[in-house]
Amino acid sequence: MSEDTRSETYAELAAVGPYGVRPGHALITMVEPHPGHEYAYNRWYEDDHYYAGAMAMPWMYAGRRWVATRDLQLLRRPEKSAIAEPVTAGCYLSTYWITDGRYDDHMRWTVGINKRLNRDGRVYRDRTHVFTAFQDHEATVYRDGAAGPRDFHALDHPYAGLVLQVVDTDSPGQRAELLEWLVSRHLPKRVTGSPSAMVTVFRPTPLPGDRMSYVQQVEGVDTRLTLLWFLEADPRECWEPYFTGLDTAVTEAGLGRVELLAPFVPTVPGTDKYVDQLR
């Protein structure tokens, strides 16, 4: 006997609200499996949670997982980070795009489904959320202008690497100054001639009060920016010429502090590739 899934409601919901392709929102989550749980965590995430806890949900239309092997972890800056303690913590990063204007709708569903997954024993406990936040899209800066993939393609295009950059400021006003400086001056100059095809800029949004208890409330809602640099080269091959000094450039501009600069490479879905290189 089939369950009542209220199928008739789906036709009503499809007829209302935004349904563009712009990534108006993102979920960016950096997680550390507890020692000894690396393989089990990876299999749980890839075989179940990536789909049941993310991609199967309404309005979350693209996703990609990334991994930092030990050599990539050791490239991170700064040594003392407000995000990760130690700065090497958080070897897996997942990034998801959510349709512009559909954040509230998605959140209602994601809170409900995660409560259900929790009740059904489908949540892996032996992990730590190092940096998990839903984010609102602020800007995308392209290296090649109108040519090449757009930001809505970014999680499906086979980029060779990604750099996560988190910048903290002292006030909402300073964050606005930082955003303007990044978009109009700093990022266009940095991506020119670089392996980075685009940089997406987000600001964190607070999690709802009925979120799962193991996920901490988001910090820096009014003062933080999160940048994703999408690379056409392995970050190990271009770290020195392009990313060394990226943190000091922000400091020298007097507009904030880079609290994390972390390189990743894409996982290979359905495999345990790189799991033996995390420690």
Image: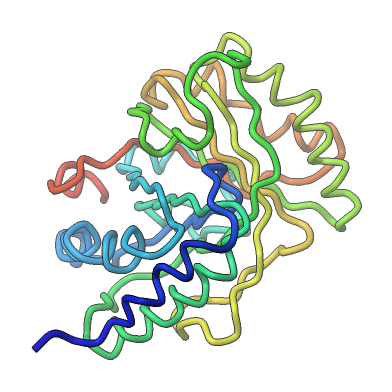
Q: Position of residue 103 (x, y in %)?
A: 58, 64
**Residue closer to the observer: 73 or 51:** 51
Is 71 left or right of 59, judged from the image as shown?
left
Q: Is residue 116 above or below residue 127?
A: below
- The residue positioned 59% from the left and 42% from the top of the image is 165
Identify the residue shown where x is 29% and y is 59%. 50
Horizontal relation, residue 198 to residue 139: left or right: left
Q: Position of residue 162 (x, y in %)?
A: 44, 35
Residue at image position (69%, 38%) is: 139
Q: Residue furthest right?
A: 173
Q: Quadrant of the N terminus?
A: bottom left
Left or right: 50, with 24 as reference point: left
Q: Is residue 207 left or right of residue 225?
A: left
- Front-lying residue, 165 or 228: 228
Residue 167, relative to residue 53: is it above or below? Answer: above
- Vertical arrangement, residue 256 with respect to residue 141, above or below: below
Q: Residue furthest left?
A: 1
Q: Look at 70% across and 44% down and name the residue there.
A: 138
- The percent coordinates of residue 233 (x first, y second) are 39, 20
Q: How is the image coloured?
A: rainbow
Q: 7 or 41: which is nearer to us? A: 7
Q: Position of residue 142 (x, y in %)?
A: 61, 22
